Amino acid sequence: MNAFIEAAISRTRTTLLIMFMVVLAGIISRVAMPIENDPSIQVPFFIVQVINEGISPEDSERLLAMPLEIEIRAVEGVEEITSYAYENAASVMVEFDADYDLDQALLDLREAVDRAKPEMPSTIEEPIIREESTEDWPILQINFVGDEVPERLLYNLALDLRDRIETIPDVRDVEMQGHREEMLEAIIDPDALESYRISGEELINTILRNNRLIPAGSIDTGSGRFSVKVPSIIETAQDMYDLPIRASGDTVVTLSDVATVRRTFKDRDRYARVNGKRTISLNVLKRTGSNLIDTVEAAKNVTAEYKQTLPAKVDIFFTQDQSPFAQGQVTELEGNIMTALALVMVIVVAAIGLRSGIIVGLGIPISFLFSLTLIYMIGYTFNFMVMFGLLLGLGMLIDGAIVVTEYADRKMLEGYDSRSAYTLAAKRMFWPVTASVATTLAAFLPLIFWPGISGKFMRYLPVTVFTVLSGSLLYALVFGPVLGSLFGKAGARDEQSLETLKQLEDGDPTRLNTLTGLYARLLSFAARYAVVTLGIAIVAVIGIFTAYGKYGSGMIFFSDSEAHYGQITVRGRGNFSADEINALVE
């Protein structure tokens, strides 16, 4: 290792070029790193939903939920199964072990659902398997409001904007809220049915047999083979009008002869209002790992461009915008880091001088940029846990640089030139500095292997501290000595300074009339009465733990913070209609 240090200091241009590359890579990583409020973690929860129109809650439990539970119990890694049976559907929430491979868990869950399907009624819709995520909360809500415009116009405008926003690469999905599902409605004329002698059952069966693609095998022509399909897909309203009900000779009775078909909406089962106005909202969800601020800005730009084409009576505005909170949090924590950096620099300069203080202080931004490069390569986002890790490592990362610089200053006062002094300091302090950093890293090492969802959330902190302290070790032993060999300069060589150094090296430091002498006398007293000192330390430790257990406020997972949103839930007895629920909420 000594040969490596000598090579780094003797080849200053190469070492400085490497340091410049570290700085450049860190700046690029910081610019490219996505910004988020909270760390993105995968939660081991899946929801299986099976829909069967018209089924009662009791039958839903027996025919839908129980077959799913039986098959899902056999899946490896399942921790807990929670089922909900209600009218028209059943849902099963499956919790896997937090450390289980979630991609494999999804595949196993799909196979279990496929095994359970034959035990369910044939009228069920295709089961839906949804993976829960911390990114399911919308980052922006876009609201369409227009009390004097038709509902269909508002619906079509929202659909058009949704399609445009979904083309943004960082947008995962755009969910509509407050709309009614569109449908084709056929109003049957009973007099026409009676005149054509067509029963209602015959009419319904004819409609049910259509709107499907029927495979009819394949034809081998000898020189080629192609599949044959009988298309009967309803794509336009005219296809519905021309649907044949009965044929007699050359006469064909179509649906338009016995019914009126029109586009309409299903009966409303929910309402949505924003600021007291009826609305159709678009909830924008971003992809995992994408930049929250940039994604919101892109969605706002698309909306602003689309807003210019809207009718005058239709208004668009935004709610639940997450970007100001994310930007404010990042700005506030970055400000705290800069304040802490200024305080550290004041203390360092006051203790070891301006020139040496600058050499030591340069280790802070270089270690930070080195850390950001590694964090970006790992795939982490720039969130409050990463910034808290940087802030936590701020006070620890300059310890090694201070030790090396202080030892080099002492050797320069003894007559060494700057290159020889910093080379000797890096060699002499290599193992003490390395051991100091290693013991600090060892304290954070267990946090990396913290199991469960909380461990995934907290893992950002020790990883950040690890990378920061690794960068500080590289700076203290390589980059710092190189800068010191170029710009280092011995302090003032007055008689008092030389006498102090002589006393520290070869004399009795307890005779010094300085703060160092006071510390030396206190240390001498503690060493003389070692048993008493050890006893006081043990009593202090026991007393602290006892006092915390008796007077402490307990433990919580998250500290109390200012809430950005509140939610009110109104509950009532009975099967209320959508209009009654709307009246209760109003």
Image (cartoon, grey):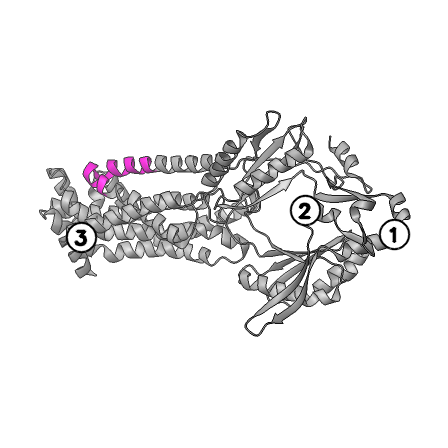
Q: Could you say which quadrant of the image residue 391 lies in?
A: top left
Q: What quarter of the picture does the C terminus occupy?
A: top right
Query: x%, y% of residue 458?
Result: 48, 51
Q: Residues within 10 Å of mark 1 (few under 14, many from 20)?
A: some
Res 89 label: none
Which is the main secondary structure of the residues drawn in magenta?
Answer: helix
For mark 2, what is the residue?
236
Please tell me whether mark 3 or mark 1 is closer to you in this view.
Answer: 1
- Residue 177 is situated, as x and y percent measured from the top left of the image, at 65, 40
Q: Say which element carries label 3.
A: helix
| Quadrant showing the N terminus | bottom left
Please provide the residue range marked out in magenta.
341-359
Residue closer to the observer: 25 or 98: 25
Circle 3 residues within 10 Å: few <14, some 14–19, many ≥20 = few
Residue 259 appears in view: yes
**Residue at which label 1 appears:** 198
Going by the image, does 581 lie left or right of 482? right
Amino acid type at image mark 2: Thr
Per the model, the C-alpha gap separating discs 3 and 1 is: 93 Å
Dot 1 or dot 2: first in sequence order is 1
Horizontally, residue 283 falls left or right of residue 516, namely: right
Mark 2 element type: loop
Q: CA distance from mark 3 to mark 2?
A: 71 Å
* Disc number for residue 14: 3
Quadrant hosting residue 280: top right
